[in-house]
Amino acid sequence: MYNVVFVLGPPGSGKGTICTQIHENLGYVHLSAGDLLRAERERAGSEYGALIEGHIKNGSIVPVEITCALLENAMIASKDANGFLIDGFPRNEDNWSGWNKQMGGKVNEQFVLFLSCPVDVCIDRCLHRGQGRTDDNVESLKKRVETYNQSTFPIIEHFEKVGMVREVNSERPVTEVYEDVVKVFAAANQK
């Protein structure tokens, strides 16, 4: 059974940055739903490439079956990992239902790491991170933030109600954020 930590927060909250540090220091494999989708979009012969491209450009959510299949394949490929950080997923109730349908009984969801950060800070980070992502522009970011507010934040609230959320303020310098994240993992692994 795979250990899974969902890493959620608004676009630009530092999910990828923190996941990289957790991977390097704690041995969890970082699986970014967005990166997996972007890679699938670019893969020659992908039957989902155009569909994924349309959703990414529109800031909308890719069908859950596609995302879950990509995540599961990535976990199988790294089956000896300490655990998996699933960055940017689930993004809504449909994602969560689809995840449970496809992955139920195959994973141990340890907790949800919620990186909270004011949206204006997040947008500024995205516009200046220089990663060349097609969705790091003002128009796409507005849609992504709207999707986050309407779809993802309610799923975070759901996880909060069932005691799974570990919130860390990610507006601060990365070193401070990471120190708090390490404490969250240490507490979770003591149980």
Image (tube, rainbow, N blue to C red):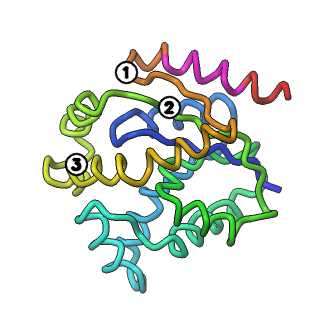
Three-letter residue code for mark 3: Leu
Q: Measuring 20% from the left and 54% from the top, which residue is drawn there?
A: 140
Q: Residue 149 appears at what percent x and percent y?
A: 35, 46
Which residue is drawn at the image coordinates 71% and 66% (left, top)? Answer: 103
* Relative to 41, 175 lies left or right: right
Q: x, y (%) of residue 22?
A: 60, 32
Query: Left or right: where does residue 78 sit relative to residue 176?
Result: right
Q: Is residue 43 above or below residue 160?
A: below
Who's the residue at 52% across and 49% down the image?
A: 155
Give the number of the disc on residue 18. Answer: 2
143 in magenta: no
Q: Secondary structure at mark 3?
A: helix
Quarter occupied by residue 76: bottom right
User: What's under tag 1, amino acid-wise?
Assistant: Glu
Q: Earlier in the sequence, mark 3 or mark 1?
A: 3
Q: Amino acid at mark 2?
A: Ile
Q: Which mark is residue 161?
A: none
State the residue position of label 3. 141
How packed is label 3: few (under 14 Cα within 10 Å), some, or many (20 or more)?
A: many
Residue at 52% from the left image edge and 36% from the top image edge = 20
- Nearest to viewer (mark 2 / mark 3): 3
Which of the pair 121/80 is nearer the observer? 121
Kindly indicate whether the residue at mark 3 contacts the one at mark 2 (C-beta within 8 angstroms). Answer: no
Secondary structure type for disc 2? helix
Mark 1 nearby-residue class (10 Å; few <14, some 14–19, many ≥20):
some
- Tell whether label 1 touches label 3 (CB within 8 Å): no
Q: Secondary structure at mark 1?
A: loop
Magenta segment boundaries in residue numbering: 177-185
Q: Residue beneath label 1, please?
A: 171
Q: Quadrant of residue 98?
A: bottom right
Q: Is residue 28 left or right of residue 34?
A: right
Q: For residue 181: magenta?
A: yes
